[in-house]
Image (spheres, rainbow, N blue to C red):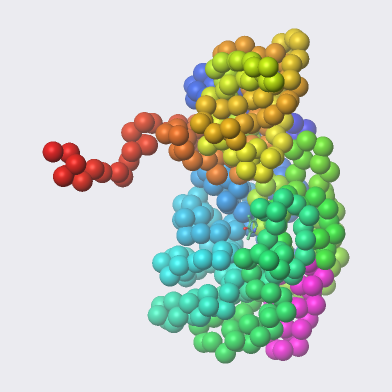
Amino acid sequence: MSDPFPRRGGHLHAEGVPIARIVEQAGTPVFIYSATALCEAYDALTTALARVRHTVCYSIKSNMNLAVVRTLVARGAGIDATSGGELFRALRAGADPSKIVYSGVGKTDPEINRALDAGIKLFNIESRAELRRIDACAEAKGCVAPIGFRVNPDVDPRTHPYISTGLRTSKFGIPIAEAVEAYAEAKALDHVCVVGVDCHIGSQILSIEPLADALARVRSLVEELRKAGHRIEIIDVGGGIGVRYQKEEPPSPALYAETVIGIVGDLDCEIVVEPGRSITANAGILITRVLYQKSNEAKHFVIVDAAMNDLIRPSLYQAYQRIEPVGPPRAPEQTVDIVGPVCESGDFLARERLLPRAEPGDLFAVRSAGAYGFAMSSNYNGRPRAAEVLVRGERFAVVRKRETLEDLVRGESVPEELTG
Ligand SMILES: *Cc1c(COP(=O)(O)O)cnc(C)c1O
């Protein structure tokens, strides 16, 4: 599919459904996902890697809606989880535990135990202290945990500092120089079994070189580990493939696969990849309604009903997300700030953006909102979280109801002495 959100007869659609029709039923703000776009992104990667034994483990943190996860799992995807909650969601969506890998710097005993009970494919261990915890948990259960270390190759992925994870200064993984020693320690333990090596250097990576540099270092490590007598069967190359938000030129699935296969394809390992953003980002949009407009000497503001609590990427990473009207564009264009109702000057979806004139009641679509959109949303400012809709062809379903005001106070209570 060229664009899952095409404009037909002047009106924006999600696949075959007019967006205005979805909004009639689901309201705003609403995230809309294209099942076809999700499947196509997954298929493109798995097809590009077809020459080697591999598992595409969708990184569930980018979009954890059960229907989105189910769509990918039904297509054959495994899951990359980074918390017990993500593991729970993956299993609830029907993921095959033998295709689940589990990373994260702060795994707790209950999380480790649930992963052991599920029988996951691989623990990506991020410290030697964690190695000992996993060994102890597995011993208590009388089982053996399949493990690898997440190694930190000290490579700069040249992306936003908040989403760089493979630098020496990062909290993630163990320094690659200490890996041999860490693997030796693992080998001496009875309730872990070394099966893999893992590396994930960051997100929204737009050039192939840092990925290639990291992989070359992983390759050397695998050779060294094998000399030391370890059976390395899995190389987990992480995720991080960039996407186009504006004019970026990310590596294609073909180039990415060529690079991976070229560097580690001859090691007779299963290749695990953990894409998140590259599967979901451009399969989703956020629809918001214009509430008000106002101007001062410096600015023209369009105030909409979606805010930083719904989509934090512009505020947090100064990220650019394309915005367009859902209906036929009105003339003339004007330079505006698109802002939400939250009480923060950092609450904006776009700044100094040239857009068709808006009127209260108009709908706007924020593109590329499928990854790290709803997943990072919050109830800040007492705002119920948005609804989510999944579209396939001519059909759509609300796959997460908009939160109610009652949802906002669920689980809270006031001590009796305060109610008297
Ligand atoms: C976030 C994350 C990913 C996915 O990153 P994307 O940039 O969304 O592809 C993969 N692996 C790990 C360990 C992560 O933390």
What is the number of callouts on the image? Answer: 0
Q: Is residue 406 above or below residue 197?
A: above
Residue drawn at 45 percent across, 34 percent down: 381
Q: Is residue 63 visible?
A: yes
Residue 90: % across, % down: 51, 54
Q: Answer left or right for 36 relative to 214.
A: left
Residue 400: % across, % down: 47, 36
- Of the 4 image quadrants, the one containing the C terminus is top left
**Could you say which is closer to the camera, residue 372 or residue 238?**
372
Q: Is residue 277 above or below residue 137?
A: above
Residue drawn at 50 percent across, 67 percent down: 107
Q: Is residue 7 visible?
A: no
**Could you say which is closer to the camera, residue 28 or residue 315?**
315
Q: Answer left or right for 259 relative to 114.
A: right
Q: Is residue 80 above or below residue 242?
A: below
Asked if residue 161 lies in the magenta stretch, the reply is: no
In the rendered image, which quarter is residue 170 located in?
Answer: bottom right
- Magenta range is 214-236
Residue at the limit of the structure toward the front, as seen here = 297
Residue drawn at 69 percent across, 29 percent down: 351
Residue at the limit of the structure toward the left, as seen here = 420
Asked if residue 227 lies in the magenta stretch, the reply is: yes
Residue 174: % across, % down: 65, 73
**Could you say which is closer to the camera, residue 305 or residue 34?**
305
